[in-house]
Amino acid sequence: MQNNQSVQLLKAAIPFFDVPIGETIDFEGLFRAIRPFVGGREGKLIDLLLQFFEMQHMMSMMQWMKAMQSQTENTSDMMEMLRASLTPEQQDTVDMVTSMMSMMQAAEEEPAAPEEEAGKAERDESVDL
C-alpha cells in the first residue's frame, strides 16, 4: 500500500471477489468500480474492456430485437410500448440499434451489383502487405 488511492481501489474491488464457490465474478462491475482509481495505461485498458462489455450489450439487444421482429408482425406498436418504458438515453440506444438493424437487413436483401463485385476484386488484388 503506497498511497490512499491503492487502498480505495482495494476497497472498491473486494466486494466483487466475495462470491460463493462456483459463481462467476462480475468483471464488468469490478472494472466500473475500480476505474476511478486507475490511471495511465491501466485506465485505458479498463476503458477498452468496458467498451467491449457495452458492445456485448448492444449485440445482445440487437439479437433480441431481431428475434422479436421475426416473431411479431406488429413490431412498431411493440417498439413504441418498449420505448415508452425506457429512459431517454436508452431510447437513443434503441433508435441507434434499430437503424443499424435496418441497414443490415437492407444490405442482406440487396444483392451486390456486378460492377461493385468487380471493383472489390480489383481492390483486393491491388493491396500489398
Image (cartoon, grey):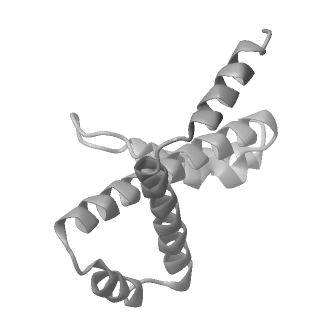
As drawn, is 126 to the left or to the right of 102?
right
Q: Quadrant of residue 71?
A: bottom left
50 is higher (above) or lower (below) than 23: below
- Residue 11 visible in rendering: no
Based on the displayed image, in which of its 4 quarters is residue 123 positioned?
top right
Q: Furthest residue to the left?
A: 71
The answer, for residue 117, to whether it is visible in the render is: yes
x 45%, y 60%: residue = 101
Residue at the far front: name it: 114
In the current view of this chain or complex, which residue is farthest to the top? 129
Residue under the image location 33 percent in, 83 percent down: 76
- 83 vs 35, nearest the viewer: 83
Specify the quadrant that holds the N terminus: top right
Give left or right: position of 88 versus 16.
right
Q: Residue at x 68, y 36 (%)?
A: 45
Image coords of residue 91 (percent x, y): 50, 79
Residue 109 coordinates in the image, percent (x, y):
41, 52
Numbered circles on residues, count: 0
The residue at 46%/57% (across/down) is 106
Relative placement, left or right, of 21 versus 41 is left
Identify the image quadrant of the C terminus. top right
Q: Position of residue 110 (x, y in %)?
A: 46, 50
In this orientation, which residue lies closer to the viewer: 64 or 50?
64
